[in-house]
Amino acid sequence: MNTPISPTLALLLDLVKRDSVTPEDRGCQELIGKRLEKLGFTLEHIPSNGVTNLWARCGTEEPLFVFAGHTDVVPTGDVSAWSSPPFDAAIIDNHVVGRGTADMKGGVAAMVTAIERFVASKKHSHGSIALLLTSDEEGPATDGTKVVIDQLQARQEHIDYCVVGEPTSADQLGDVIRHGRRGSLGAKVVIKGKQGHVAYPHLADNPVHRAMPALTELCAIEWDKGNDHFPPTTLQISNINAGTGATNVIPGTLQVEFNLRYSPETTIEHIRATVQLLFDAHELESDIEWKDSAHPFITKPGTLTDAMQHAISNEVGITAKLDTGGGTSDGRFIAPTGAQVIEFGPINATIHQIDERVSCTDIDTLSRIYESVLQQLLSKQED
Ligand SMILES: [Zn+2]
């Protein structure tokens, strides 16, 4: 069966063939920028430490509607394990198979063609449209969206609405919209004891024995109960290490790392104080290095979530669930500016996996959904 090549699919194939493993962009943004320039967009390339960023804006009026996304992809893993080479963008069973198809070149292609159709339709009656692209979302994310947002903030360019095209759908295109994300706080802990001979424990101090009851208690803490929009805060130990390798030596230290995905019902200060209090109660001598990598954010149901839910229900006939699950995303850099930020995109079942894929039908539907959101927010209301 031959899949007809729609404009969105053609652009997606072109993007996937560029092997833009993070932080590379491989000309994706230049390609997209040229198309938007033809529509009257003003381009600003904002490179930062080897990262490629693009801010393209059409219009100067408020409100400002922004599509945001990334052109970088994660590494392929074992290329021979793929059904077809990961940068060939083969179409198999009406799906494009390749690295970055779902995360998130499918979303990027859909936003570009949605903008093109919307601008060509001349329904754009007020406000401005912009596209924010970075090649540093899958990497450390320090030179990407954050850098662009800092520049916008410095010149008081304010975003009203932002749709990030990350793959949020679970079983069916349109079933999940993310309207917030949990925070992420990590800790690297060294618990100190005194090294010694296992036969002479009175001359040593075993940090494993000291740490175990404290860590057991730590894992059992109920941090909060979550709220209407967020699940409860969770803590997971990711790494634990102690011992010299010898069976007759009590180790001198124990290293443990854990991460919390936290709801706005808990603060970083509360988490840090609780951990410290617990370690003190167990008389642990410890060094704790905290890593604050993302603060929680939420866009309350309103204009933007309504427009997206309406568009989805019109196109696919289902009511999208508003959800705050998943890992962190670049939405965390945009939301603090006061913008309404949501994420919506293709099915995420294969992201970062071998044979990552996206449905050819879904990306066309996605593009129409994005176009409908533009129409609802930036064209004259007919009814
Ligand atoms: Zn992504």
Image (cartoon, grey):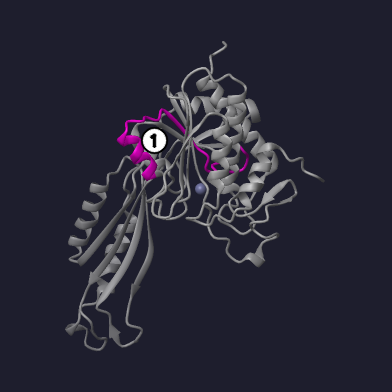
Magenta range is 146-173
The answer to whether 54 is drawn above or below residue 51 in the figure is above
Query: For the point 39% across and 35% down, which residue is it?
Result: 298
Quarter of the picture holding the C terminus: top right
Spot the residue most to the top: 383
Identify whether 208 is placed above or below 238: below
Return the x and y of residue 369 as percentages of the image width and height. Answer: 60, 30
- For the residue pair 230 and 290, the one nearer the viewer reads as 290
Tell me the residue that label 1 is attached to. Answer: 298
User: Residue 167 magenta-drawn?
Assistant: yes
Image point (68%, 41%), residue name: 9
Point 19% across, 56% down: residue: 277
Residue 42 seen anywhere in this rendered image of the structure:
yes
Q: Residue furthest right?
A: 1
Residue 304 in percent (x, y) is at 47, 27
Identity of the residue drawn at 52% across and 25% down: 307
